[in-house]
Image: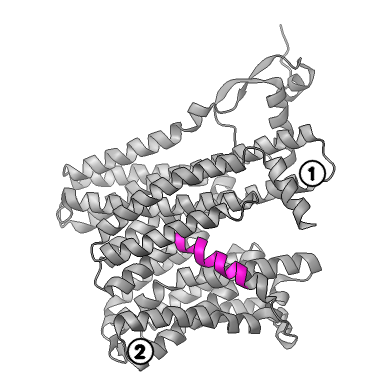
Amino acid sequence: MMRREPLNKLYTIAPTGTTVNSRHASARARWVPVFLAVVATEGVLVLTALGASTAAMVLALVVLILISLVLLTAPPADSASASTEESVVEARARARALAAFEAQDRSGRARARALWTMLQAMSPAILLGLGYPMVSSQLASHDVGGVHLSSLVLSVSVAVPWLSQVAGTPVYRLVGEISYASGTSAAYRFARMWPALVVLVVPPVLLVAALVVLTTGWSTTAMAAYLVLALMNMLFVQSLVVADIAGSRGRWTIGWVAYAIVLLIAPTVWILPPLAGLISQVVLMGRALGGLAHPMSVPLRPFLADTARGLIMGGVLWSDKLFMFLVNGTDFEIVVVYLCLQPAVVAYSYYFAVTSPRINRAVAHFQTELTDASMDRLHDQGRFLRRTVTASLRRAVVVGVVSVGVAVLTAALLSGSGTAIGGLGAIGVLKVAVIAAASLLLTVLTLLAYEIEHVGDRTGGLVLSSIHLAAALGLFIGLGSHAVRAYAAVGLVDLVLVVVALTVYRSRWRSPEYAFFWGKALSW
């Protein structure tokens, strides 16, 4: 009886010209999950538009949620997913790369950990998405300077995510790089820089406030409250950077839990929720706050460069809500727009919370190999790295597409009274699908721009993001009074940009060993 040799031993002893059968996806097989996700979501749209019963809608929703859970808790995507023939050289390359990076943990504990990570990453959307509707009547019954408190809170809510990208991007780079270089804690270095960072966050907030007062004509009292609330939210966001850099999702989540609890307890004391979140992070920093007694300046040139980068690249996913508010005030379908945003947020959170840490570790290991590894070895590991990044992007797209189906079904069930689509109808289904799909394209473009920059091309991602911002600004000004038309037009523009971005991404990641080598050489 023939004894089976371990696969890695076969890789070693087999002649170079032979092929082996291994678990590695062909180009066609890699896109099968995307195709199936699209087909499933299209089926949901047809089912909803045709007026299926509530029971059928609930069953379809449960199935899609189960599919989403399987996708979210599966091991981070890499290039191994289907069986095909490959050369021994390729098989050896993948075996070395897998050994160098890490083996996948497919246990139930790993799936539970992935789900918990996703819940933590989604905690702002989950907690605030549930909290604000519960206190909406109380917010609407109070006013500040003649403006309903609900309108004031909404005006800040649509601006803070984009402002967070503008103000947070420089902090991640400055605190992270300085802390790693000096060996001190991120919290201590952040505390030393915090006074300067507080001053530097004021101009972006003032700029947005100027746009709000120009388009709304609110009173001085209302705008003063707007500035205070926006600045308090920005201080809270800055404090979260420490937990994020340290990799402590638990501390990060504690901040949002504190925010949500105080929102439910005292919604009309509008300054308290962000203040509670800020205090929770300050307490967790502990002795590191001693750095406040030794303030340090912030290098202005890199700070401004990263601020501009956050403005442009962060604006892809978060600018549309602010544009809608500036054009319409509160007179737009807020619930629909935010429901349709959730598939984009799920895909974005999945990529950066679940798959990105593994990619970052792989990139860090790859960069250490640049100094002494042979070119053949770098080429092998570069190919594996490229396939891992591409597979992770593909998985994020699948997660987002399935989430679009969940959003459509949720809208259908919430809109009816007794029947699944009593208040939605075929036109309503189409509206939700268009806005959700356009929002998902925002995430896809953001992720592609990020990975284009990740491999060393700092211009490509910025150019693509700038084109989106310019187009979105014009389209929302012209069509913003009709949300579905504006999002449909922006979606068409982004579809073209995604195709271009995908082409640029493939070009830049074709030989990552060369891209990372030259990036490292130019930094010396």
Q: Front-most of 163 and 279? A: 163
What residue is drawn where x is 80% and y is 69%? 182
Q: Give x and y (percent) for residue 233.
A: 49, 78
Q: Is disc 2 surrounded by few (<14), some (14 to 19) or many (20+) residues within 10 Å? A: some
User: Which comes sooner in the sequence, label 2 or label 1?
Assistant: 2
Q: Front-most of 396 and 169? A: 169
Task: Determine which residue is flagged by label 2.
Answer: 222
Q: Which mark is residue 216?
A: none
Q: Give x and y (percent) for residue 261.
A: 44, 76
Q: Front-most of 298 and 194? A: 298
Q: Give x and y (percent) for residue 415.
A: 20, 58
Relative to 256, say whether 428 is above or below: above
What residue is drawn where x is 69% and y is 49%? 361
Relative to 390, say whether 459 is above or below: below
Placement of the N terminus among the 4 image quadrants: top right
Task: Determine which residue is flagged by label 1.
Answer: 369
Which residues, given as a range, are shown in magenta? 304-316
Q: Is residue 315 magenta?
A: yes
Placement of the C terminus among the 4 image quadrants: bottom right
Q: Secondary structure at mark 2?
A: helix
Identity of the residue furthest to the top in this view: 1
Q: Give x and y (percent) for residue 388.
A: 60, 40
Q: Is residue 272 magenta?
A: no
- Amino acid bearing label 1: Glu
Q: Is residue 505 visible?
A: yes
